[in-house]
Structure formats: C-alpha cells, structure tokens
Image (cartoon, rainbow, N blue to C red):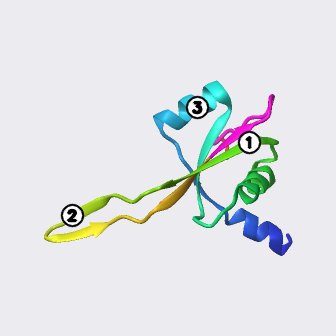
Amino acid sequence: MSMLNYTLASVLQAPIISEKSTVAAESNKQFAFKVQKNATKTQIKKAVELMFQVQVDSVKVLNVKGKSKRFGQILGKRSDWKKAYVKLKEGQDIDFSAA
C-alpha cells in the first residue's frame, strides 16, 4: 500500500449509524461518515472509493459544533467534528453489517 492510500484510509473515522442515516441510505443511497476535521470533499470521495470499492456520485460535508456540557460545577465543551454525506452512483451499495 502506498503512502497516499494510508492517508486516505485515515480520513474516514467511523460510519454514522442512526435512524436518520439509515433512512437516507435506504431511500437515496446516501451514507454518513465521521471524518477528519481537515478532510476535503475529494479526499473523502477517494477514501470511500478505496475502502468500499464503490463509485461515489457526490459528497456533502458539514461541521458539527460541539455541545456545551456541565461536568459537576465545571462548564465544559465537547469537541467540534465534521460529518460527510456520501451519495453513491446507481447500482452501488455499502453493507456495514458484513464489514
């Protein structure tokens, strides 16, 4: 594996499995991933194509702001993170249960 493949493999941190992402996957072939904060759309596209052997149609990204939380008397904040919605081309699919 080349160094480029290692950096692309580290772009995707985890798939997001929720009710909203499951509905999007079933209806629109759109999958949600937690990605690195500095990842670009092209890096995300190449990483998904490399790891799952699928063809990506489009990528939408959004920055999720961390919530303010209270830990006893101390006021804290969760970390900000980036979410990516990846839409696959017609006939493509990702099966997380088999992976």
Q: Secondary structure at mark 3?
A: helix
Numbered range of the magenta stretch: 85-96
Quadrant assignment, res 2: bottom right
Q: Secondary structure at mark 1?
A: strand
Q: For marks 1 and 3, give the one nearer the viewer.
A: 1
In the displayed structure, 99 sits above or below 78; it is above
In this rendering, would 87 be left or right of 62?
A: right
Identify the residue under disc 2: 70
Residue at the location (52% across, 42% down)?
17
Q: Secondary structure at mark 2?
A: strand
Q: Earlier in the sequence, mark 1 or mark 2?
A: 1
Near mark 2 (Cα within 10 A), the count class, few <14, some 14-19 or many ≥20, is: few
Residue at the location (49% across, 34% down)?
20
Q: Earlier in the sequence, mark 3 or mark 2?
A: 3
Identify the residue under disc 3: 24
- The three-letter code of the residue at mark 2 reads Arg
Identify the residue under disc 1: 58
User: Residue 93 at x, y = what percent?
Assistant: 74, 35
Residue 93's label in the rendered image is: none
The reply to whether the magenta stretch includes residue 2 is no
- The three-letter code of the residue at mark 3 reads Ala
Q: Main secondary structure of the magenta part?
A: loop
In the picture as drawn, the residue positioned furthest to the right comes out as 2
- The three-letter code of the residue at mark 1 reads Ser
